[in-house]
Amino acid sequence: TVGKALRNRELALLIHASDASEDGIRKLAGIAKSLNLFPSIRLFDQAQLAAALGRTGTVVHGGLKPGGIAESFLRSSQRLAGFSPEHG
């Protein structure tokens, strides 16, 4: 699970669907904050997040392990957020 990966410090980036429940986001953000970890992204809805991560169906919470993919995803998401009326 995402929570287990967070607690094990296996993730470099935490991703929440923009339409995820506030309770789920709060729980995972609390774990990340308690461990003094990395940024999170909340830019895509569940279907968009699934497509971005190459999954079928929907994804509510996810994470990327350290490396080039996480860095690229973060940069691209930050650029995209600059063009989004909801996030800019």
Image (cartoon, rainbow, N blue to C red):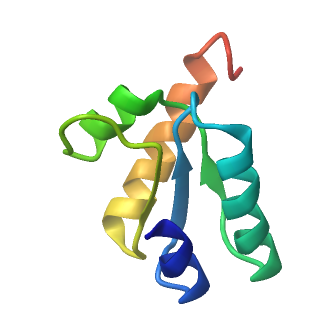
Q: Is residue 26 above or below residue 48?
A: below
Which percent across, then down, holds residue 2?
48, 67
> Which residue is farthest bottom?
8
Q: Is residue 82 above or below residue 61?
A: above
- In this rendering, position of residue 74 left or right of residue 56: right
Near-viewer residue (88 or 44): 44
- In this rendering, position of residue 31 left or right of residue 43: right
> Which residue is farthest top?
85
Near-viewer residue (57 or 11): 57
- Residue ID at (40%, 73%): 65
Tag count in the figure? 0
Which percent across, then down, holds residue 68?
34, 67
- Residue ID at (52%, 37%): 17
Which percent across, then down, holds residue 26?
76, 53
Indicate the quadrant containing the C terminus: top left, top right, bottom left or bottom right. top right
- Residue ID at (44%, 40%): 76
Indicate the quadrant containing the N terminus: top left, top right, bottom left or bottom right. bottom left
Which percent across, then down, holds residue 48?
35, 28
